[in-house]
Amino acid sequence: MDLDLETAKTSQKIIESTMNNKSSEVENLITKTLGVLQENGIYGCILYLNSRTSEAEKKIGPVIHEELLKMTKRLVKTPTKNDDYEYLTDEICSDIDLLILTKQLWEQTLTYARYGAKART
């Protein structure tokens, strides 16, 4: 399985799903999300996306959240749970190898998505 291809496809889905938003708003939230991911990890990243308060970020954040988790559940074969937070803590964060893999996949996806948002302008 080509993980780089999967991250590229996921980033394209994020960009396609946010076409109704200004590219600068999409790029800004992706950049901030990438920073949170790098500093606070995958759990902090999802919390950050779900805590946005501006109208634009309330629309963009759930798209990023959904696409990152869909990719993770597709690539990282673990039992899925209905609650995203529980899934991350019980299935991903509890296994250091999966945690590192997931963080790297998300970083690559968000980097590609940031470039995609920038290219839209």
Image (cartoon, helix red, strand yellow):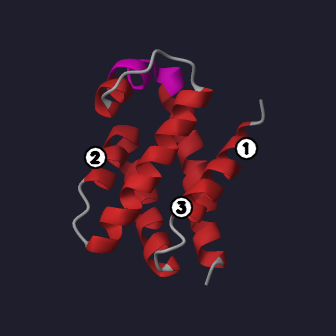
Q: Quadrant of the C terminus?
A: bottom right
The kind of residue on which mark 2 rests is Leu
Identity of the residue drawn at 57% across and 66% down: 114
Q: In this rendering, would 19 be left or right of 9? A: left
Q: Which residues are magenta?
A: 90-98
How many other residues sit within 10 Å of disc 3, few (<14), some (14-19) or many (≥20)? Answer: some
How many other residues sit within 10 Å of disc 1, few (<14), some (14-19) or many (≥20)? Answer: few
Mark number, residue 47: 2
Above or below, 5 relative to 86: below
Q: Which residue is mark 3?
A: 17
Q: Magenta span has 95?
A: yes
Helix, strand or loop under label 2: helix
Mark closer to the chain start, 3 or 1: 1
**Foreground residue, 59 or 53?**
59
Residues at marks 2 and 1 touching, judged by CB atoms closer than 8 Å: no
The kind of residue on which mark 1 rests is Asp
Above or below, 21 relative to 92: below
**Foreground residue, 75 or 32?**
75
**Foreground residue, 12 or 89?**
12
**Foreground residue, 30 or 16?**
16
